[in-house]
């Protein structure tokens, strides 16, 4: 019975989408019940698989229609659930369940909500099918379902500012990516005459022919477009800002991770390309420039959600860098950071949505001082902001620390100076992330309250529950990282590396050995003297010392002189500044103007490149594809 | 191995990419997306060709005489192409709907005017 | 056909051609759907042929006649019903004890009959029904933008 659960988890979502279409246009209650029931049932099915797959170490192999392989040749569509699939499936399922709970109150003022819930369930079903499947063409079809639902949801509030053009740009660039993926799959079929990932990886074990290299380049770029790494990141910034916030949370939490999962599966399992040095260099290079460009563009933004979108792009850069190193510590760090990114970025987007729901604007120059009116939202936002900047004791610290350790160990092992430079860039980007979030927190939650926000109150309870759940998981991941490592990360890392077990489960024992599949040899990951707990204790000691110094020092702040009325002469009026009752509002985007002015050339160039014209973004995508294919042909043989 | 088909499909894909990258009218960009899809469909169908094979259907005379092995072309790429044609039709429909709504809101279909989100 | 008051009369040649082609399109499309497992064709191809009836009515009689014969709300609900039927047929395999999408009763019927392939035949019918209603709805939505003034469609997205 348990082997049917993965397919049922995906099908119940699609069935829910069709039922909402039939019954949901009349009554609001029916619609909400069907959507939440489908999401919860899917969550229960996936959660029931944790014990057999993650803890006991089984792998579930399922051929649709009982079409098992005939004479060593795979002819059916196979679903294979090993620990790496289940890791990403848990993230996906948690994200869309919380988004469904959040959108009950958040979307209540919109019209055509039947269409919204249908699209939301189709998007979730598409992403869940993508991470659970073991067949190449099925993966492509799920990618297409995901893209369509995402584009339609971006343009959902079509009276909003820029929603339609964001959806159009997302569709054009996403369609280029999907076409690349399909061309790659066609070339792969030409080479192997089968579509099952297990059999393809056995056949490609000996080496890659030129067709194989071209297929690798195309499919890799296709999944790169879906996960929005740097030459393809421009539609992401528009789409995350224009979509309704419960959907932005799904984009940054699930759709990105589906692209990352696709890249890991293609590079590690199907092509076994991680042993090749140029592939590793390409991934680390793309990850590093993604990190850097994401965070510097974020410092120059005026809009709350667009800023969060650029930070999302930057954190995916961390994940790609860590995964691209090819060591076990790197994969563990990358997967841990992917999990943490879903949690804290989802939390940040939910808080942004709460602010938008109550005040009606996301412009940083018009908000301010909301912590007096929305205290619980402010606390959750602070938890998220500290997590993303990498401060202990939150989960961002543990995973970023692991990423620094991974890059530095690789630099020490191979003696290549470039990896140490990557570590330095990663730390600098982390500092700039902290700077950017100080700016946002000051602009939105602290500071003066403008008059337009006088009547703002706290958000309703069903919107606060997902925020609390995510904050709790952030703190839990930061404090109990050993538990997370043992039960979730170590099995997933081992599954990504152990290719021959993946093939043997699907195709029969001994199949992998007959084709000469050799597993990657990597040392297991451990913590040693880089243990985050040591640094957490150090941080707490330093914090205590700081507080003691502040409290016991003398307060020598200068006093302010008041001008006594009888001494005032009209000729001195020009030297007294400010009026007591006037409200002067410091715009949020004006902080760090000094940094922006110093780097004026860089910022003008980058903001000119993000011109908003869809042809420019398409030219970047095509150029990047060409360069990647050329690079791979020159250096891999 | 039909060389002409492969060359034609690569030409179509490159033409489609050129149209998306360099044409400014939004409907031309949508047509470019369609041309890329047609090129890929041609590539997919040509992959399954076996020289001298017939259509992958059993005829009644084969079945009544008990003949069970005839030399077919590969049926799997034909199924993949069918799926891809459907997906291409849906992409074109959605893109055209978006272009219509953009025209109503922005009063222009030039890509240089549709750029309120930038920077 | 007697038109309602206020509808402009279209060109007589176009109207006659639409009259002649309409039953042919519908019947041929249904034939391709129904015999999908034993001859070339199947659900998608036949469904698109039947859905072209919407275009033929629009070309021959104008937007109002097309709107009256194909009601968008009913069509939309029917599309979802076709999709639900497909998923339920695929779940039939689970009820028998095999995997998902299993072909369940394919031993009935001789080779060459219409209903001889088991669940696949009915899945083909479900897909054909879904595509016919789905593409018909899509065509009506696009045509509503060309409606004469005073009857501007909502133009909402799919």
Image: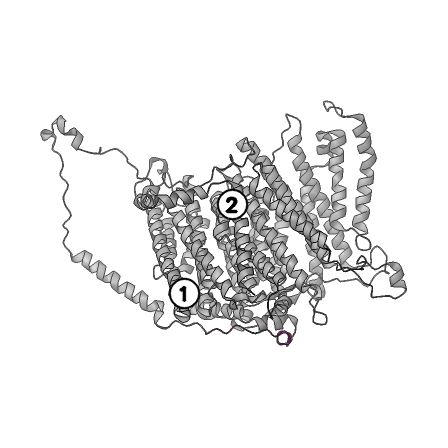
Name the residue beneath numbered marker 2. A617
Nearest to N terminus: mark 1 or mark 2: 1
Which chain is home to disc 1? Answer: A
Magenta part of the protein: which range? A508-523
- Identity of the residue drawn at 34% across and 55% down: A431
Q: Secondary structure at mark 1?
A: helix
- Identity of the residue drawn at 45% across and 58% down: A285
Q: Secondary structure at mark 2?
A: helix
Q: Nearer the viewer, residue B72 or A460?
A: B72
Distance CA(mark 1)–CA(mark 2): 31 Å
- Residue A175 locus on image (x, y percent): 59, 48
Which chain is home to disc 2? Answer: A
Q: Residues within 10 Å of mark 1 (few under 14, many from 20)?
A: many
Q: Which mark is residue A407?
A: 1
Q: Is residue A504 above or below residue A315?
A: below
**Residue C85 at least partly seen:** no
Q: Give yes or no for contact between labels 1 and 2 (Cβ–Cβ under 8 Å).
A: no
Q: Quadrant of residue A533?
A: bottom left
Quadrant into which the N terminus of chain B falls = bottom right
- Residue B102 locus on image (x, y percent): 56, 35
Quadrant into which the C terminus of chain B falls = top left
Q: Is residue A517 magenta?
A: yes
Q: Is residue A16 magenta?
A: no
Q: Residues within 10 Å of mark 2 (few under 14, many from 20)?
A: many
- Residue A553 locus on image (x, y percent): 15, 56
- Magenta stretch: dominant secondary structure: loop
- Residue C46 locus on image (x, y percent): 77, 47
């Amino acid at each position: 019975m348990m082997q049917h659960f993965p397919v049922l988890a995906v099908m119940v979502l699609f069935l829910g989408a069709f039922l909402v279409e039939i019954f949901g246009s009349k009554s609001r209650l029916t619609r909400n019940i069907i959507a939440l029931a489908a999401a919860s049932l899917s969550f229960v099915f996936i959660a029931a698989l944790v014990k057999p797959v993650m803890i006991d170490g089984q792998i579930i192999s399922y051929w649709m229609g009982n079409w098992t392989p005939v004479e060593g040749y795979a002819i059916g569509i196979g679903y294979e659930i090993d620990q790496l699939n289940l890791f990403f499936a848990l993230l996906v399922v948690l994200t869309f369940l919380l988004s469904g709970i959040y959108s009950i109150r958040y979307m209540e003022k919109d019209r055509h909500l039947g269409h919204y819930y249908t699209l939301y369930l189709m998007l979730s079903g598409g992403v869940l099918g993508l991470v659970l499947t073991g067949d190449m063409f099925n993966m492509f079809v799920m990618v297409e379902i995901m893209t369509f639902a995402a584009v339609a949801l971006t343009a959902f509030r079509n009276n909003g500012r820029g929603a339609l053009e964001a959806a159009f740009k997302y569709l054009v660039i996403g369609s280029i990516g999907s076409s690349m993926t399909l061309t790659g799959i066609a070339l792969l079929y030409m080479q192997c005459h089968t579509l099952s990932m297990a059999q393809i990886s056995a056949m490609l074990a000996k080496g890659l022919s030129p067709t194989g290299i071209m297929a690798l380049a195309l499919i890799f770029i296709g999944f790169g477009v879906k996960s929005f790494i740097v030459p393809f990141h421009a539609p992401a910034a528009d789409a995350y800002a224009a979509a309704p916030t419960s959907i932005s949370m799904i984009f940054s939490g699930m759709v990105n991770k589906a692209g990352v999962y696709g890249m890991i599966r293609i590079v590690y399992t199907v092509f076994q390309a991680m042993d090749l040095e140029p592939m590793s260099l390409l991934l680390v290079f793309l990850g590093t420039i993604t990190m850097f460009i994401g965070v510097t563009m974020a410092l120059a933004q005026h809009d709350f959600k667009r800023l969060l979108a650029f930070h999302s792009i930057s954190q995916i850069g961390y994940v790609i860098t860590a995964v691209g190193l090819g060591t076990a510590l790197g994969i563990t760090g990358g997967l841990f950071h992917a999990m943490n990114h879903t949690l804290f970025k989802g939390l940040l987007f939910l808080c942004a949505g709460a602010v938008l729901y109550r005040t009606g604007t996301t412009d940083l120059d018009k908000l301010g001082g909301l912590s007096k009116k929305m205290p619980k939202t402010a606390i959750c936002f602070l938890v998220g902001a500290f997590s993303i900047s990498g401060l202990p004791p939150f989960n961002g610290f543990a995973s970023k620390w692991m990423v620094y350790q991974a890059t530095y160990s690789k630099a020490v092992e191979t003696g290549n100076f470039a990896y140490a430079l990557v570590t330095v860039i990663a730390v600098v980007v982390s500092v700039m992330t902290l700077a950017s979030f100080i700016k946002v927190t000051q602009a939105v939650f602290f500071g003066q309250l403008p008059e337009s926000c006088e009547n703002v109150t706290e958000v309703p309870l069903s919107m606060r529950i997902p925020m609390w759940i995510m904050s709790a998981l952030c703190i839990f991941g930061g404090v109990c990282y050993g538990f997370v490592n043992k039960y979730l990360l170590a099995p997933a890392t081992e599954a990504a590396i152990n290719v021959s077990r993946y093939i043997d489960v699907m195709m029969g024992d001994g199949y992998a050995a007959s084709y000469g599949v050799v597993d990657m040899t990597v040392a297991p990951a451990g913590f040693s003297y880089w243990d985050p707990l040591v640094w957490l204790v150090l941080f707490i000691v330093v914090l205590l010392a700081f507080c003691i110094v502040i409290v016991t020092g003398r307060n020598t702040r200068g006093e302010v002189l008041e001008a006594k009325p009888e001494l005032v002469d009209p000729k001195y009026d020009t030297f007294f500044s400010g009026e007591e009752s006037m409200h002067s509002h410091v715009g949020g985007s004006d902080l760090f103007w000094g940094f922006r002015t110093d780097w004026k050339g860089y910022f003008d160039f980058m903001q000119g490149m993000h011109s908003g014209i869809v042809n420019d973004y398409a030219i970047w995508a095509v150029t990047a594809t060409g360069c990647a294919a050329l690079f791979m042909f020159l250096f891999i043989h | 191995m039909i060389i002409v088909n492969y060359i034609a499909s690569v030409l179509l894909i490159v033409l489609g990419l050129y149209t998306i990258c360099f044409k400014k009218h939004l409907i031309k960009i949508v047509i470019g997306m369609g041309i890329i899809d047609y090129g890929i469909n041609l590539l997919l169908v040509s992959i399954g060709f076996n020289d001298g094979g017939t259509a992958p259907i059993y005829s009644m005379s084969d079945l009544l005489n008990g003949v069970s092995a005839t030399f077919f072309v590969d049926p799997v790429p034909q199924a993949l192409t069918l799926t891809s044609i459907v997906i291409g039709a849906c992409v074109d429909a959605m893109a055209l709907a978006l272009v219509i709504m953009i025209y109503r809101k922005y009063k222009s279909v030039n890509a240089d005017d549709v750029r309120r989100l930038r920077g | 056909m007697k038109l309602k008051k206020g509808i402009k009369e279209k060109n007589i040649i176009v109207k006659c051609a639409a009259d002649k082609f309409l039953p042919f399109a519908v019947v041929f499309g249904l034939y391709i759907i129904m015999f999908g497992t034993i001859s070339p064709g199947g659900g998608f191809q036949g469904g698109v042929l039947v859905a072209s009836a919407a275009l033929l009515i629009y070309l021959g009689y104008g937007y109002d006649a097309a709107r009256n014969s194909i009601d968008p709300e009913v069509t939309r609900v029917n599309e979802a019903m076709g999709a639900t039927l497909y998923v339920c047929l695929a779940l039939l395999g689970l009820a028998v004890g095999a995997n998902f999408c299993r072909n369940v009763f394919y031993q009935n019927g001789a080779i060459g009959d219409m209903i001889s392939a088991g669940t696949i035949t009915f899945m083909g019918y479900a897909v054909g029904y879904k595509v016919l209603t789905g593409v018909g709805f899509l065509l009506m939505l696009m045509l509503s933008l060309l409606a004469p003034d005073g009857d501007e469609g909502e133009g909402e997205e799919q």
